Image (cartoon, helix red, strand yellow):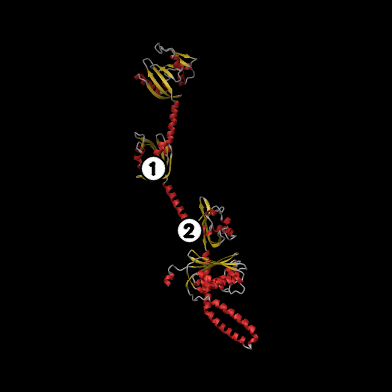
Amino acid sequence: MARAADQNSGAIKIKFPGEFGTGIPDLADVIDNLGEPFLVLDWQGHIQYLNKAAVSLFNFADQEELTKQAGNAFLQLNPLLAENFKEAVQKKSPIHFEVELPNGWYEVHYNPNSNWLSVHLHDISKTKQLESELQHCIERFEASVDNMLDSFVILSAIRDESNLIQDFVIEFPNRFACSVLGKKPEDIIGKTLLEVYPGHRGSRLYADYIRVVETGQPLKLESYYYEQPNFSGHFDIQAIKTGDGLAVSWRDVTQRHLTEEALRLSEERFYKAFQLNPATMSISRVRDGSYINVNQRWLETTGYTHAEVIGNNATNLGIWADGDFCRVFSKAFHAGGNLRGLDVKVRTKSGKVLSGHLSSEVITMNGEPCWLTVFQDMTEKRLLEEHLARLDRLNLIGETAASIGHEIRNPLTSVRGFLQLMAESKEGSVFKEYFDVIIEELDRTTFILSEFLLLAKDKAVNLRPHNLNSIVQAIYALLQADANRAEKTIELNLEPVPILNLDQKEIRQLVCNLARNGLEAMESGGTLAISTRFVKGYVVLAIKDTGKGIAPEIQERLGTPFVTNKDGGTGLGLAVCYSIAARHHAQLSYETGPGGTTFFVKFKPPEPGYFTSLS
Protein backbone atom coordinates (compact mmCIF):
# COMPACT_ATOMS: atom_id res chain seq x y z
CA MET A 1 0.00 0.00 0.00
CA ALA A 2 1.22 3.50 -0.77
CA ARG A 3 0.88 6.37 1.74
CA ALA A 4 -0.03 9.94 0.72
CA ALA A 5 -0.40 13.13 2.78
CA ASP A 6 -3.57 15.13 2.33
CA GLN A 7 -2.63 18.61 3.48
CA ASN A 8 -6.23 19.77 3.48
CA SER A 9 -7.68 16.93 5.57
CA GLY A 10 -4.81 16.53 8.08
CA ALA A 11 -4.99 12.69 7.67
CA ILE A 12 -2.85 10.10 5.95
CA LYS A 13 -4.57 8.88 2.82
CA ILE A 14 -3.97 5.41 1.49
CA LYS A 15 -5.09 3.53 -1.59
CA PHE A 16 -7.48 0.84 -0.39
CA PRO A 17 -7.39 -2.55 -2.02
CA GLY A 18 -10.20 -3.16 -4.41
CA GLU A 19 -12.18 -5.27 -1.94
CA PHE A 20 -11.90 -2.67 0.92
CA GLY A 21 -15.14 -0.76 1.01
CA THR A 22 -16.58 -2.34 -2.08
CA GLY A 23 -20.09 -1.13 -2.65
CA ILE A 24 -19.71 1.71 -0.17
CA PRO A 25 -18.37 4.64 -2.21
CA ASP A 26 -18.35 7.13 0.72
CA LEU A 27 -16.91 4.78 3.38
CA ALA A 28 -13.46 6.42 3.30
CA ASP A 29 -14.95 9.82 4.04
CA VAL A 30 -17.14 8.46 6.82
CA ILE A 31 -14.23 6.76 8.56
CA ASP A 32 -11.97 9.75 8.04
CA ASN A 33 -14.45 12.02 9.82
CA LEU A 34 -15.20 9.77 12.75
CA GLY A 35 -14.98 11.56 16.12
CA GLU A 36 -12.86 8.77 17.59
CA PRO A 37 -9.43 7.49 16.46
CA PHE A 38 -9.43 4.71 13.82
CA LEU A 39 -6.34 3.01 12.39
CA VAL A 40 -5.50 0.14 10.06
CA LEU A 41 -2.31 -1.82 10.77
CA ASP A 42 -0.63 -4.46 8.66
CA TRP A 43 0.54 -7.73 10.17
CA GLN A 44 3.83 -6.12 11.13
CA GLY A 45 2.03 -3.40 13.06
CA HIS A 46 2.80 -0.64 10.60
CA ILE A 47 0.20 2.06 10.16
CA GLN A 48 -1.57 1.67 6.85
CA TYR A 49 -4.27 4.18 7.59
CA LEU A 50 -5.38 6.60 10.32
CA ASN A 51 -8.24 9.01 10.34
CA LYS A 52 -8.22 12.64 11.40
CA ALA A 53 -9.01 11.88 15.05
CA ALA A 54 -6.08 9.40 15.22
CA VAL A 55 -3.53 12.08 14.33
CA SER A 56 -3.91 13.50 17.90
CA LEU A 57 -2.39 10.28 19.29
CA PHE A 58 1.05 11.10 17.99
CA ASN A 59 3.53 13.76 18.90
CA PHE A 60 4.82 14.78 15.48
CA ALA A 61 5.63 18.35 14.50
CA ASP A 62 3.67 18.19 11.25
CA GLN A 63 1.89 15.79 8.97
CA GLU A 64 4.83 15.38 6.62
CA GLU A 65 6.99 14.10 9.49
CA LEU A 66 4.14 11.81 10.50
CA THR A 67 4.02 10.47 6.89
CA LYS A 68 7.71 9.70 6.84
CA GLN A 69 8.08 8.20 10.35
CA ALA A 70 4.72 6.67 11.16
CA GLY A 71 5.71 3.00 10.77
CA ASN A 72 4.92 1.12 13.93
CA ALA A 73 4.65 4.35 15.94
CA PHE A 74 1.21 3.32 17.21
CA LEU A 75 2.46 0.16 18.91
CA GLN A 76 5.26 2.17 20.51
CA LEU A 77 2.80 4.45 22.33
CA ASN A 78 2.38 1.84 25.09
CA PRO A 79 3.86 -1.67 25.48
CA LEU A 80 0.37 -2.99 26.16
CA LEU A 81 -0.61 -2.08 22.60
CA ALA A 82 2.17 -4.24 21.13
CA GLU A 83 1.52 -7.09 23.56
CA ASN A 84 -2.16 -7.29 22.72
CA PHE A 85 -1.40 -6.82 18.99
CA LYS A 86 0.69 -10.01 18.96
CA GLU A 87 -2.06 -11.90 20.77
CA ALA A 88 -4.73 -10.69 18.34
CA VAL A 89 -2.59 -11.63 15.34
CA GLN A 90 -1.77 -15.07 16.74
CA LYS A 91 -5.33 -15.92 17.74
CA LYS A 92 -6.89 -13.99 14.88
CA SER A 93 -9.67 -12.97 17.27
CA PRO A 94 -10.85 -9.58 18.53
CA ILE A 95 -9.34 -8.20 21.73
CA HIS A 96 -10.69 -5.36 23.90
CA PHE A 97 -8.65 -3.67 26.61
CA GLU A 98 -7.95 -0.33 28.30
CA VAL A 99 -4.71 1.55 27.96
CA GLU A 100 -3.32 4.92 29.00
CA LEU A 101 -1.82 6.90 26.13
CA PRO A 102 -0.03 10.28 26.31
CA ASN A 103 -3.21 12.22 25.67
CA GLY A 104 -5.56 10.15 27.83
CA TRP A 105 -7.20 6.82 28.56
CA TYR A 106 -8.74 4.75 25.79
CA GLU A 107 -10.71 1.59 25.36
CA VAL A 108 -8.97 -0.20 22.46
CA HIS A 109 -10.66 -2.68 20.13
CA TYR A 110 -8.41 -4.88 17.92
CA ASN A 111 -10.34 -6.56 15.09
CA PRO A 112 -8.10 -8.69 12.76
CA ASN A 113 -9.14 -10.06 9.35
CA SER A 114 -7.24 -11.94 6.65
CA ASN A 115 -5.17 -8.95 5.44
CA TRP A 116 -4.99 -6.33 8.19
CA LEU A 117 -6.02 -5.37 11.71
CA SER A 118 -8.36 -2.49 12.36
CA VAL A 119 -7.98 -0.46 15.55
CA HIS A 120 -10.83 1.51 17.12
CA LEU A 121 -10.10 3.68 20.17
CA HIS A 122 -12.87 4.98 22.46
CA ASP A 123 -11.81 7.89 24.71
CA ILE A 124 -12.60 6.96 28.33
CA SER A 125 -10.49 9.70 29.97
CA LYS A 126 -13.53 11.37 31.51
CA THR A 127 -14.81 8.04 32.80
CA LYS A 128 -11.41 7.25 34.29
CA GLN A 129 -11.26 10.68 35.87
CA LEU A 130 -14.68 10.15 37.43
CA GLU A 131 -13.68 6.67 38.58
CA SER A 132 -10.53 8.12 40.12
CA GLU A 133 -12.46 10.82 41.87
CA LEU A 134 -15.00 8.27 43.04
CA GLN A 135 -12.22 6.05 44.34
CA HIS A 136 -10.69 8.99 46.19
CA CYS A 137 -14.07 9.77 47.69
CA ILE A 138 -14.51 6.16 48.73
CA GLU A 139 -11.04 6.12 50.24
CA ARG A 140 -11.65 9.37 52.09
CA PHE A 141 -15.05 8.14 53.28
CA GLU A 142 -13.64 4.82 54.46
CA ALA A 143 -10.68 6.53 56.11
CA SER A 144 -12.87 9.02 57.93
CA VAL A 145 -15.52 6.47 58.89
CA ASP A 146 -12.92 3.89 59.82
CA ASN A 147 -11.22 6.32 62.18
CA MET A 148 -14.42 7.44 63.87
CA LEU A 149 -14.72 6.92 67.61
CA ASP A 150 -18.34 5.88 67.00
CA SER A 151 -19.64 2.56 65.75
CA PHE A 152 -20.73 2.88 62.12
CA VAL A 153 -22.38 0.23 59.93
CA ILE A 154 -24.07 0.18 56.54
CA LEU A 155 -27.04 -2.18 56.31
CA SER A 156 -29.03 -3.49 53.36
CA ALA A 157 -32.60 -4.68 53.76
CA ILE A 158 -33.50 -8.36 53.38
CA ARG A 159 -37.07 -8.65 52.11
CA ASP A 160 -39.43 -11.59 51.83
CA GLU A 161 -41.77 -12.46 48.98
CA SER A 162 -44.25 -9.87 50.26
CA ASN A 163 -41.52 -7.23 50.07
CA LEU A 164 -41.48 -6.92 53.88
CA ILE A 165 -38.18 -6.37 55.64
CA GLN A 166 -37.18 -9.45 57.61
CA ASP A 167 -33.64 -8.48 58.56
CA PHE A 168 -30.63 -6.47 57.41
CA VAL A 169 -27.31 -7.64 56.04
CA ILE A 170 -24.18 -5.83 57.21
CA GLU A 171 -22.37 -4.37 54.18
CA PHE A 172 -19.73 -2.38 56.00
CA PRO A 173 -18.65 -2.04 59.65
CA ASN A 174 -16.02 0.49 60.65
CA ARG A 175 -13.01 -0.37 62.77
CA PHE A 176 -14.59 0.88 66.02
CA ALA A 177 -17.73 -1.21 65.50
CA CYS A 178 -15.52 -4.27 65.05
CA SER A 179 -13.46 -3.47 68.16
CA VAL A 180 -16.60 -3.14 70.29
CA LEU A 181 -17.67 -6.61 69.21
CA GLY A 182 -14.12 -7.98 69.41
CA LYS A 183 -14.29 -9.23 65.80
CA LYS A 184 -12.60 -8.65 62.44
CA PRO A 185 -14.45 -7.01 59.52
CA GLU A 186 -14.52 -10.29 57.57
CA ASP A 187 -16.29 -11.92 60.51
CA ILE A 188 -19.07 -9.35 60.32
CA ILE A 189 -19.53 -8.40 56.64
CA GLY A 190 -22.30 -10.46 55.08
CA LYS A 191 -23.80 -11.45 58.40
CA THR A 192 -27.30 -10.32 59.34
CA LEU A 193 -27.98 -7.60 61.88
CA LEU A 194 -29.79 -9.96 64.24
CA GLU A 195 -26.86 -12.40 64.12
CA VAL A 196 -24.29 -9.80 65.08
CA TYR A 197 -26.52 -7.57 67.23
CA PRO A 198 -29.10 -9.91 68.81
CA GLY A 199 -30.19 -7.14 71.20
CA HIS A 200 -32.19 -5.63 68.31
CA ARG A 201 -34.61 -8.54 68.17
CA GLY A 202 -38.12 -7.39 69.07
CA SER A 203 -36.83 -3.96 70.16
CA ARG A 204 -38.22 -0.51 69.45
CA LEU A 205 -34.89 0.32 67.82
CA TYR A 206 -35.29 -2.47 65.22
CA ALA A 207 -38.77 -1.18 64.38
CA ASP A 208 -37.29 2.32 64.01
CA TYR A 209 -34.70 0.98 61.52
CA ILE A 210 -37.49 -0.46 59.37
CA ARG A 211 -39.38 2.83 59.57
CA VAL A 212 -36.29 4.74 58.34
CA VAL A 213 -35.98 2.49 55.25
CA GLU A 214 -39.70 2.51 54.44
CA THR A 215 -40.38 6.23 55.01
CA GLY A 216 -37.00 7.86 54.46
CA GLN A 217 -37.37 9.75 57.74
CA PRO A 218 -34.05 9.93 59.63
CA LEU A 219 -33.73 8.59 63.17
CA LYS A 220 -32.14 10.31 66.15
CA LEU A 221 -32.20 8.83 69.67
CA GLU A 222 -30.44 10.18 72.74
CA SER A 223 -29.22 8.06 75.66
CA TYR A 224 -30.98 4.96 74.32
CA TYR A 225 -30.23 1.95 76.51
CA TYR A 226 -29.08 -1.08 74.49
CA GLU A 227 -28.10 -4.45 75.88
CA GLN A 228 -26.76 -7.71 74.51
CA PRO A 229 -24.45 -10.39 75.95
CA ASN A 230 -21.11 -8.88 74.92
CA PHE A 231 -21.82 -5.18 75.54
CA SER A 232 -24.45 -2.78 76.86
CA GLY A 233 -24.83 0.87 77.75
CA HIS A 234 -26.48 4.14 76.78
CA PHE A 235 -26.01 5.33 73.21
CA ASP A 236 -26.81 8.30 70.99
CA ILE A 237 -28.04 6.68 67.75
CA GLN A 238 -28.52 8.23 64.31
CA ALA A 239 -29.71 6.50 61.14
CA ILE A 240 -30.42 7.67 57.58
CA LYS A 241 -31.72 5.81 54.55
CA THR A 242 -29.17 4.71 51.91
CA GLY A 243 -30.69 2.91 48.94
CA ASP A 244 -32.74 -0.01 50.22
CA GLY A 245 -30.97 0.10 53.56
CA LEU A 246 -29.55 2.53 56.04
CA ALA A 247 -26.37 3.88 57.58
CA VAL A 248 -26.28 3.78 61.37
CA SER A 249 -23.90 5.42 63.83
CA TRP A 250 -23.75 4.64 67.56
CA ARG A 251 -21.97 6.81 70.10
CA ASP A 252 -21.40 5.38 73.57
CA VAL A 253 -22.60 8.03 76.05
CA THR A 254 -22.79 5.78 79.10
CA GLN A 255 -20.31 7.89 81.06
CA ARG A 256 -22.09 11.08 80.04
CA HIS A 257 -25.40 9.54 81.06
CA LEU A 258 -24.00 8.54 84.45
CA THR A 259 -22.61 12.05 84.92
CA GLU A 260 -25.92 13.62 83.90
CA GLU A 261 -27.78 11.28 86.24
CA ALA A 262 -25.41 12.13 89.07
CA LEU A 263 -25.89 15.82 88.32
CA ARG A 264 -29.67 15.37 88.25
CA LEU A 265 -29.64 13.57 91.58
CA SER A 266 -27.37 16.25 93.02
CA GLU A 267 -29.70 18.99 91.79
CA GLU A 268 -32.69 17.05 93.13
CA ARG A 269 -31.04 16.70 96.54
CA PHE A 270 -30.16 20.41 96.54
CA TYR A 271 -33.72 21.32 95.53
CA LYS A 272 -35.20 19.20 98.31
CA ALA A 273 -32.72 20.51 100.87
CA PHE A 274 -33.46 24.05 99.68
CA GLN A 275 -37.25 23.81 99.49
CA LEU A 276 -37.80 21.71 102.61
CA ASN A 277 -35.27 23.51 104.80
CA PRO A 278 -36.91 24.96 107.93
CA ALA A 279 -34.65 28.01 107.59
CA THR A 280 -35.54 30.94 105.34
CA MET A 281 -33.42 30.52 102.17
CA SER A 282 -33.03 32.48 98.94
CA ILE A 283 -30.83 32.58 95.83
CA SER A 284 -30.18 35.97 94.25
CA ARG A 285 -27.85 37.33 91.56
CA VAL A 286 -24.70 39.09 92.73
CA ARG A 287 -24.86 41.68 89.94
CA ASP A 288 -28.26 43.18 90.83
CA GLY A 289 -29.60 41.23 93.83
CA SER A 290 -32.63 39.96 91.89
CA TYR A 291 -34.11 36.77 93.29
CA ILE A 292 -33.77 33.57 91.24
CA ASN A 293 -35.50 31.33 93.77
CA VAL A 294 -36.77 31.33 97.35
CA ASN A 295 -37.94 28.39 99.42
CA GLN A 296 -41.39 27.83 100.89
CA ARG A 297 -40.25 28.89 104.35
CA TRP A 298 -39.08 32.25 102.91
CA LEU A 299 -42.54 32.87 101.45
CA GLU A 300 -44.27 31.87 104.69
CA THR A 301 -41.99 34.10 106.76
CA THR A 302 -42.21 37.23 104.58
CA GLY A 303 -45.80 36.85 103.36
CA TYR A 304 -44.90 37.45 99.69
CA THR A 305 -45.94 35.22 96.78
CA HIS A 306 -43.48 33.53 94.44
CA ALA A 307 -44.57 35.74 91.53
CA GLU A 308 -43.96 38.92 93.56
CA VAL A 309 -40.42 37.89 94.46
CA ILE A 310 -38.78 36.26 91.43
CA GLY A 311 -36.94 38.86 89.34
CA ASN A 312 -37.32 41.49 92.05
CA ASN A 313 -34.77 42.38 94.72
CA ALA A 314 -34.84 42.94 98.48
CA THR A 315 -34.40 46.70 98.20
CA ASN A 316 -37.47 47.12 95.98
CA LEU A 317 -39.49 44.86 98.26
CA GLY A 318 -38.31 46.72 101.37
CA ILE A 319 -37.11 43.52 103.01
CA TRP A 320 -34.31 45.09 105.03
CA ALA A 321 -35.64 47.02 108.03
CA ASP A 322 -32.18 48.48 108.71
CA GLY A 323 -31.61 51.44 106.43
CA ASP A 324 -27.85 50.94 106.61
CA PHE A 325 -28.01 47.21 105.89
CA CYS A 326 -26.62 47.25 102.33
CA ARG A 327 -23.46 49.08 103.41
CA VAL A 328 -22.95 46.78 106.40
CA PHE A 329 -23.61 43.70 104.25
CA SER A 330 -21.18 44.80 101.53
CA LYS A 331 -18.46 45.64 104.04
CA ALA A 332 -18.85 42.37 105.93
CA PHE A 333 -19.00 40.31 102.75
CA HIS A 334 -15.90 41.81 101.13
CA ALA A 335 -13.98 41.45 104.37
CA GLY A 336 -14.42 37.67 104.51
CA GLY A 337 -15.84 36.56 101.15
CA ASN A 338 -18.90 35.21 102.97
CA LEU A 339 -21.14 36.02 105.89
CA ARG A 340 -21.83 34.11 109.06
CA GLY A 341 -24.44 35.08 111.65
CA LEU A 342 -24.87 38.76 110.77
CA ASP A 343 -27.56 40.33 113.00
CA VAL A 344 -30.29 41.78 110.78
CA LYS A 345 -33.88 42.96 110.91
CA VAL A 346 -36.27 41.85 108.19
CA ARG A 347 -39.56 43.53 107.32
CA THR A 348 -42.40 41.29 106.16
CA LYS A 349 -45.06 42.22 103.61
CA SER A 350 -47.43 43.12 106.46
CA GLY A 351 -44.83 45.47 107.97
CA LYS A 352 -43.90 43.22 110.88
CA VAL A 353 -40.21 43.40 111.75
CA LEU A 354 -38.35 40.16 112.46
CA SER A 355 -34.87 39.93 113.95
CA GLY A 356 -32.41 37.13 113.32
CA HIS A 357 -29.10 35.94 111.93
CA LEU A 358 -28.15 36.09 108.25
CA SER A 359 -25.50 33.96 106.54
CA SER A 360 -24.55 34.16 102.86
CA GLU A 361 -22.22 32.34 100.47
CA VAL A 362 -21.40 32.91 96.79
CA ILE A 363 -22.35 29.96 94.55
CA THR A 364 -22.51 29.54 90.77
CA MET A 365 -25.88 28.99 89.10
CA ASN A 366 -25.89 28.46 85.31
CA GLY A 367 -22.44 30.05 85.10
CA GLU A 368 -23.51 33.16 87.02
CA PRO A 369 -22.33 34.13 90.55
CA CYS A 370 -25.22 34.16 93.02
CA TRP A 371 -25.78 34.61 96.75
CA LEU A 372 -27.16 31.65 98.67
CA THR A 373 -28.60 33.40 101.71
CA VAL A 374 -30.00 31.84 104.88
CA PHE A 375 -31.98 33.87 107.40
CA GLN A 376 -32.62 32.30 110.79
CA ASP A 377 -35.61 33.98 112.40
CA MET A 378 -34.69 34.55 116.06
CA THR A 379 -37.72 36.71 116.92
CA GLU A 380 -39.57 34.04 118.88
CA LYS A 381 -36.38 32.84 120.52
CA ARG A 382 -35.45 36.32 121.65
CA LEU A 383 -38.97 36.95 122.91
CA LEU A 384 -38.73 33.69 124.84
CA GLU A 385 -35.37 34.72 126.24
CA GLU A 386 -36.83 38.06 127.30
CA HIS A 387 -39.81 36.24 128.78
CA LEU A 388 -37.56 33.90 130.75
CA ALA A 389 -35.42 36.81 131.94
CA ARG A 390 -38.56 38.63 133.03
CA LEU A 391 -39.74 35.53 134.87
CA ASP A 392 -36.39 35.27 136.60
CA ARG A 393 -36.74 38.85 137.78
CA LEU A 394 -40.32 38.22 138.87
CA ASN A 395 -39.26 35.10 140.73
CA LEU A 396 -36.59 37.07 142.55
CA ILE A 397 -39.05 39.81 143.38
CA GLY A 398 -41.66 37.23 144.32
CA GLU A 399 -39.29 35.54 146.73
CA THR A 400 -38.52 38.95 148.23
CA ALA A 401 -42.23 39.79 148.48
CA ALA A 402 -43.02 36.48 150.17
CA SER A 403 -40.23 36.88 152.71
CA ILE A 404 -40.71 40.52 153.72
CA GLY A 405 -44.21 41.52 152.57
CA HIS A 406 -46.08 40.35 155.66
CA GLU A 407 -43.31 41.55 157.96
CA ILE A 408 -43.81 45.07 156.64
CA ARG A 409 -47.60 45.10 156.31
CA ASN A 410 -48.31 43.96 159.91
CA PRO A 411 -46.37 46.83 161.57
CA LEU A 412 -47.96 49.27 159.15
CA THR A 413 -51.43 48.08 160.26
CA SER A 414 -50.49 48.70 163.88
CA VAL A 415 -49.08 52.15 163.11
CA ARG A 416 -52.21 53.07 161.17
CA GLY A 417 -54.43 52.02 164.13
CA PHE A 418 -52.51 54.05 166.67
CA LEU A 419 -52.44 57.09 164.34
CA GLN A 420 -56.20 56.85 163.93
CA LEU A 421 -56.62 56.74 167.76
CA MET A 422 -54.31 59.74 168.18
CA ALA A 423 -56.19 61.67 165.48
CA GLU A 424 -59.50 61.07 167.32
CA SER A 425 -58.09 62.10 170.76
CA LYS A 426 -58.51 65.59 172.11
CA GLU A 427 -54.80 66.25 172.10
CA GLY A 428 -54.42 64.95 168.55
CA SER A 429 -57.34 66.81 167.07
CA VAL A 430 -55.06 69.78 166.56
CA PHE A 431 -52.92 67.65 164.15
CA LYS A 432 -55.82 65.72 162.57
CA GLU A 433 -55.07 67.12 159.14
CA TYR A 434 -51.52 65.79 159.32
CA PHE A 435 -52.68 62.46 160.69
CA ASP A 436 -55.10 62.10 157.76
CA VAL A 437 -52.24 62.65 155.27
CA ILE A 438 -50.05 60.08 157.07
CA ILE A 439 -52.90 57.52 157.18
CA GLU A 440 -53.58 58.08 153.45
CA GLU A 441 -49.94 57.42 152.60
CA LEU A 442 -49.92 54.34 154.87
CA ASP A 443 -53.01 53.06 153.00
CA ARG A 444 -51.22 53.60 149.69
CA THR A 445 -48.19 51.76 150.99
CA THR A 446 -50.42 48.88 152.17
CA PHE A 447 -52.02 48.74 148.71
CA ILE A 448 -48.61 48.58 147.02
CA LEU A 449 -47.56 45.82 149.40
CA SER A 450 -50.77 43.89 148.61
CA GLU A 451 -49.95 44.17 144.90
CA PHE A 452 -46.36 43.26 145.65
CA LEU A 453 -47.48 40.10 147.46
CA LEU A 454 -49.27 38.98 144.30
CA LEU A 455 -45.81 38.47 142.79
CA ALA A 456 -44.94 35.87 145.38
CA LYS A 457 -43.52 32.77 143.69
CA ASP A 458 -45.24 30.31 145.99
CA LYS A 459 -48.62 32.01 145.87
CA ALA A 460 -51.32 29.34 145.88
CA VAL A 461 -53.59 29.18 142.82
CA ASN A 462 -57.05 27.65 142.77
CA LEU A 463 -57.25 26.09 139.27
CA ARG A 464 -60.71 24.96 138.19
CA PRO A 465 -62.44 24.38 134.85
CA HIS A 466 -63.67 27.75 133.57
CA ASN A 467 -64.77 29.31 130.33
CA LEU A 468 -62.58 32.34 129.63
CA ASN A 469 -65.45 34.10 127.85
CA SER A 470 -67.60 33.84 131.00
CA ILE A 471 -64.90 35.48 133.13
CA VAL A 472 -64.52 38.35 130.65
CA GLN A 473 -68.28 38.87 130.42
CA ALA A 474 -68.54 38.87 134.24
CA ILE A 475 -66.22 41.89 134.59
CA TYR A 476 -67.37 43.64 131.39
CA ALA A 477 -69.90 45.86 133.24
CA LEU A 478 -67.22 47.00 135.69
CA LEU A 479 -64.78 47.80 132.88
CA GLN A 480 -67.49 49.53 130.83
CA ALA A 481 -68.25 51.79 133.81
CA ASP A 482 -64.58 52.81 133.98
CA ALA A 483 -64.61 53.46 130.22
CA ASN A 484 -67.78 55.58 130.38
CA ARG A 485 -66.30 57.80 133.05
CA ALA A 486 -63.30 58.40 130.78
CA GLU A 487 -65.51 58.92 127.67
CA LYS A 488 -64.16 55.77 126.01
CA THR A 489 -65.79 52.57 124.74
CA ILE A 490 -65.12 48.84 125.01
CA GLU A 491 -65.93 46.30 122.30
CA LEU A 492 -66.19 42.55 122.92
CA ASN A 493 -65.58 39.94 120.24
CA LEU A 494 -65.68 36.59 122.00
CA GLU A 495 -65.51 33.49 119.80
CA PRO A 496 -66.25 29.97 121.14
CA VAL A 497 -63.17 28.60 122.93
CA PRO A 498 -62.39 25.37 124.84
CA ILE A 499 -62.69 25.13 128.65
CA LEU A 500 -59.46 26.08 130.45
CA ASN A 501 -58.01 25.22 133.85
CA LEU A 502 -57.99 28.70 135.47
CA ASP A 503 -57.89 30.55 138.78
CA GLN A 504 -60.92 32.76 138.28
CA LYS A 505 -59.80 35.55 140.63
CA GLU A 506 -56.36 35.80 139.09
CA ILE A 507 -57.68 35.82 135.52
CA ARG A 508 -60.18 38.55 136.49
CA GLN A 509 -57.29 40.60 137.85
CA LEU A 510 -55.17 39.92 134.71
CA VAL A 511 -58.00 41.09 132.44
CA CYS A 512 -58.72 44.13 134.63
CA ASN A 513 -55.06 45.17 134.75
CA LEU A 514 -54.56 44.87 130.98
CA ALA A 515 -57.89 46.54 130.19
CA ARG A 516 -57.29 49.47 132.57
CA ASN A 517 -53.76 49.92 131.18
CA GLY A 518 -55.32 50.13 127.73
CA LEU A 519 -57.98 52.60 128.82
CA GLU A 520 -55.37 54.81 130.48
CA ALA A 521 -53.23 54.73 127.32
CA MET A 522 -56.00 56.23 125.14
CA GLU A 523 -57.37 59.71 124.70
CA SER A 524 -61.11 60.44 125.06
CA GLY A 525 -63.10 58.77 122.30
CA GLY A 526 -60.75 55.79 122.10
CA THR A 527 -61.97 52.21 121.76
CA LEU A 528 -60.64 49.20 123.63
CA ALA A 529 -61.23 45.84 121.91
CA ILE A 530 -61.28 42.63 123.95
CA SER A 531 -61.41 39.40 121.94
CA THR A 532 -60.94 35.66 122.37
CA ARG A 533 -60.33 33.01 119.71
CA PHE A 534 -58.98 29.51 119.27
CA VAL A 535 -55.93 29.48 116.95
CA LYS A 536 -53.52 26.62 116.20
CA GLY A 537 -54.29 24.77 119.42
CA TYR A 538 -54.18 27.83 121.68
CA VAL A 539 -56.87 29.97 123.30
CA VAL A 540 -55.79 33.57 122.67
CA LEU A 541 -57.02 36.52 124.73
CA ALA A 542 -56.29 39.83 122.95
CA ILE A 543 -56.75 43.32 124.46
CA LYS A 544 -56.14 46.10 121.94
CA ASP A 545 -56.09 49.85 122.56
CA THR A 546 -55.91 52.76 120.13
CA GLY A 547 -53.28 54.73 122.03
CA LYS A 548 -49.90 56.00 120.85
CA GLY A 549 -48.00 52.80 121.58
CA ILE A 550 -45.32 51.98 124.13
CA ALA A 551 -42.14 54.05 124.07
CA PRO A 552 -39.06 52.05 122.94
CA GLU A 553 -37.14 52.84 126.12
CA ILE A 554 -40.02 51.38 128.20
CA GLN A 555 -40.39 48.26 126.02
CA GLU A 556 -37.00 46.87 127.04
CA ARG A 557 -38.00 46.83 130.74
CA LEU A 558 -41.72 46.25 130.30
CA GLY A 559 -43.10 44.04 133.09
CA THR A 560 -40.37 44.95 135.58
CA PRO A 561 -41.88 46.09 138.90
CA PHE A 562 -41.94 49.85 139.51
CA VAL A 563 -41.21 50.63 135.84
CA THR A 564 -44.03 52.81 134.49
CA ASN A 565 -44.71 55.86 132.35
CA LYS A 566 -48.00 56.76 134.09
CA ASP A 567 -48.29 59.54 136.64
CA GLY A 568 -48.99 57.97 140.00
CA GLY A 569 -48.49 54.42 138.65
CA THR A 570 -46.66 51.78 140.64
CA GLY A 571 -45.41 49.70 137.71
CA LEU A 572 -46.76 46.57 139.41
CA GLY A 573 -49.91 45.97 137.32
CA LEU A 574 -48.15 44.50 134.28
CA ALA A 575 -45.63 42.70 136.46
CA VAL A 576 -48.57 41.01 138.23
CA CYS A 577 -50.02 40.05 134.81
CA TYR A 578 -46.75 38.35 133.82
CA SER A 579 -46.70 36.55 137.17
CA ILE A 580 -50.32 35.36 136.76
CA ALA A 581 -49.61 34.19 133.19
CA ALA A 582 -46.57 32.24 134.41
CA ARG A 583 -48.61 30.50 137.11
CA HIS A 584 -51.14 29.46 134.43
CA HIS A 585 -48.34 28.31 132.04
CA ALA A 586 -49.56 30.91 129.56
CA GLN A 587 -47.55 33.19 127.25
CA LEU A 588 -47.93 36.97 127.53
CA SER A 589 -46.72 39.02 124.54
CA TYR A 590 -47.54 42.29 122.83
CA GLU A 591 -47.38 44.23 119.57
CA THR A 592 -47.10 47.99 119.65
CA GLY A 593 -46.90 50.85 117.21
CA PRO A 594 -48.13 54.40 116.57
CA GLY A 595 -51.67 53.05 116.10
CA GLY A 596 -51.87 51.37 119.49
CA THR A 597 -50.85 48.32 121.48
CA THR A 598 -52.25 44.79 121.62
CA PHE A 599 -51.49 42.39 124.47
CA PHE A 600 -51.90 38.67 123.78
CA VAL A 601 -52.28 35.94 126.39
CA LYS A 602 -52.01 32.41 124.93
CA PHE A 603 -53.45 29.55 127.01
CA LYS A 604 -52.84 25.90 126.17
CA PRO A 605 -56.08 23.90 126.75
CA PRO A 606 -55.79 20.64 128.72
CA GLU A 607 -55.73 17.37 126.81
CA PRO A 608 -59.16 15.90 125.93
CA GLY A 609 -60.50 13.86 128.84
CA TYR A 610 -58.55 15.85 131.46
CA PHE A 611 -61.61 17.20 133.21
CA THR A 612 -63.37 13.81 133.00
CA SER A 613 -60.45 12.08 134.75
CA LEU A 614 -60.27 14.92 137.28
CA SER A 615 -63.92 14.50 138.27
For the point 43% across and 27% down, which residue is it? 128
Q: Secondary structure at mark 1?
A: helix
Residue 541 position, x and y percent, is 52, 67
> What amino acid type is highlighted by mark number 2?
Asn
435 relative to 396, above or below = below
Q: Secondary structure at mark 2?
A: loop
255 relative to 467, above or below = above
396 relative to 355, above or below = below
Residue 529 position, x and y percent, is 56, 66
| Mark 2, residue position | 277
| Mark 1, residue position | 204
> What amino acid type is highlighted by mark number 1?
Arg
Q: Residues within 10 Å of mark 2 (few under 14, many from 20)?
A: some
Q: Quadrant of the C terminus?
A: bottom left
For the point 48% across and 56% down, which residue is it? 275
Q: Residue furthest right?
A: 430
